[in-house]
């Protein structure tokens, strides 16, 4: 069922309450999600994006209740990823000649995925304009790497709507669609989790793109992303947040993450958190288990932190495989401007701390010299000085 966004612009997507994981099993979805498609019925009828293939049959049935498919004049594919383009093959079987407006890169990604080079692609770039009648126009804006090289946004004049694709989105299901109807805490958490885990690797692109977007001086009344809620109450708040988040973002927070074999390294994690609180009651401290907590939630906390401490016991002359895998994910996210410290227990050889330090240094963390290294299980009295030194190093 369509929902009105403004005047002749309608939402026609899928609110997916059941979705638990996204990007295969790589991103946890805690509050549902949506794939937002938009139908514009002006002098010309335009469909902006579709939904993921498994939801395609339902999508087309819903779309047909709102419009004769043959009267769709243009399709805009803001991005080639399957969650937005997955229904194109089904749709193009029905309306094979309708032009698809997308970037040149999206021609490649759509052809690569669906193998239909005969589709009527119309490659566009920033500033290209499509007249849709009734005095309204669509203006295309390249959004390279927000989220793929093929991404773009589409701005609609007259109604002043920016269809921003993945940018400014969240995995958050909300039938009422708009940010003023959403649970603000959940919305802002999900927006930040999305940014940290999905756009984190492309922060340098975001940092360049936001001033460019603002510099276009387009009046923006509504930002309609392709996932989650639509920003109509103070829509530029999310653009301002992206500007902040893409600039080595940090809050007054220290996050301690660890994995542990027999709870020795876990004990250090909690002693360290206590010491940080003792020295500075103002700083927010969080302790998270690499194997016990959701990895995307952990990364959201790391993203917010000014400093982190990473712990692993030594096992077979190395760190735990869970911690290695977690560090690989941390590397992908390319966070910058954060301090780090390491800690861990060992029984025999004790290489864990050195490996953690080398890895975090290679990831551009400012690794402090102080560390906590405990032979066998830590006793508070024996690790006290090391814990104090690390806590002070992270706070300062
Ligand atoms: Fe929501 Fe990059 O796709």
Image (tube, helix red, strand yellow):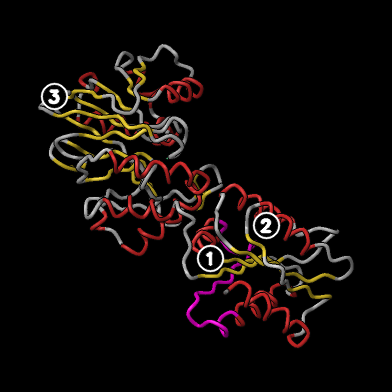
Can residue 118 be seen here? The reply is yes
Name which quarter of the figure residue 13 lies in: top left
Towards the viewer: 362 or 381: 362
Question: Residue 96 has which mark?
Answer: none
Q: Are marks 2 and 1 in contact (CB under 8 Å)?
A: no
Q: Quadrant of the N terminus?
A: top left
Question: Is residue 285 in the magenta section?
Answer: yes
Callout 2: CB less than 8 Å from ligand 1: no
Q: Secondary structure at mark 1?
A: loop
Q: Secondary structure at mark 3?
A: strand
Position of residue 249 measured from the top left corner of the image (x, y, whole percent): 47, 58
For label 3, the residue is 133
Question: Residue 360 has which mark?
Answer: 2
Towards the viewer: 72 or 373: 373
Residue for point 50% across, 24% down: 113
33 in relation to 256, above or below: above
Tell which circle, 2 or 1, labels the residue nearer the N-terminal end.
Answer: 1
Q: Are marks 1 and 3 in contact (CB under 8 Å)?
A: no
Tell which circle, 1 or 3, labels the residue nearer the N-terminal end.
Answer: 3
354 in relation to 160, above or below: below
Name which quarter of the figure residue 92 lies in: top left
Alpha-carbon neighbours of circle 2 within 10 Å: few (<14), some, or many (≥20)? many
Can residue 1 be seen here? The reply is no
For label 1, the residue is 306
Q: Marks 1/3: CA distance?
A: 51 Å
> Magenta span covers which residues?
276-295
Towards the viewer: 233 or 278: 278
Please name which of the two marks, 1 or 3, marks the residue nearer to the observer: 1
Task: Answer with left or right where residue 258 lies relative to residue 335.
Answer: right
């Amino acid at each position: 069922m369509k929902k009105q966004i403004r005047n002749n612009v309608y939402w026609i997507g899928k609110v997916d309450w059941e979705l638990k994981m996204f990007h295969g099993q790589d991103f946890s979805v805690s509050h549902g999600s949506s794939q937002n498609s938009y139908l514009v019925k002006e002098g010309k009828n335009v469909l902006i994006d579709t939904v993921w293939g498994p939801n395609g049959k339902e999508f087309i049935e819903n779309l047909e209740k709102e419009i004769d498919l043959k009267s769709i004049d243009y399709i805009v594919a803001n991005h080639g990823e399957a969650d937005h383009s997955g229904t194109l093959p089904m749709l193009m079987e029905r309306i094979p000649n309708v032009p698809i407006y997308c970037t040149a890169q999206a021609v490649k990604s759509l052809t690569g995925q669906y193998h239909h080079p005969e589709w009527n692609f119309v490659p566009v770039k920033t500033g290209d304009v499509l007249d849709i009648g009734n005095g309204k126009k669509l203006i295309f804006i390249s959004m390279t790497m927000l989220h793929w090289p093929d991404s773009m946004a589409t701005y609609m004049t007259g109604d002043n709507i920016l269809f921003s694709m993945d940018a400014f989105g969240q995995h958050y299901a909300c039938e009422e669609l708009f940010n003023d109807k959403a649970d603000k805490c959940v919305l802002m958490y999900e927006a930040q989790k999305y940014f940290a885990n999905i756009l984190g690797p492309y922060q340098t692109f975001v940092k360049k793109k936001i001033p460019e977007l603002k510099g276009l001086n387009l009046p923006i009344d509504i930002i309609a992303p392709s996932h989650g809620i639509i920003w109509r109450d103070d829509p530029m708040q999310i653009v301002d947040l992206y500007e902040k988040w893409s600039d080595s973002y940090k809050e007054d927070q220290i996050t301690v993450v660890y994995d542990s074999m027999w709870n020795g390294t876990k004990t250090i994690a909690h002693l360290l958190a206590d010491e940080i609180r003792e020295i500075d009651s103002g700083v927010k401290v969080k302790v998270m288990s690499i194997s016990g907590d959701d990895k995307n939630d952990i990364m959201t906390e790391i993203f917010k932190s000014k400093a982190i401490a990473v712990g692993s016991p030594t096992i077979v002359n190395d760190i735990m495989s869970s911690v290695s895998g977690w560090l690989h994910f941390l590397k992908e996210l390319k966070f910058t401007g954060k301090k780090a410290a390491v800690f861990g227990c060992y029984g025999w050889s004790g290489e864990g701390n050195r490996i953690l330090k080398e890895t975090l240094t290679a990831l551009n963390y400012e690794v402090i010299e102080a560390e906590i290294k405990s032979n066998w299980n830590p006793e508070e009295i024996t690790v006290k000085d090391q814990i104090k030194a690390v806590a002070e190093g992270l706070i300062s």
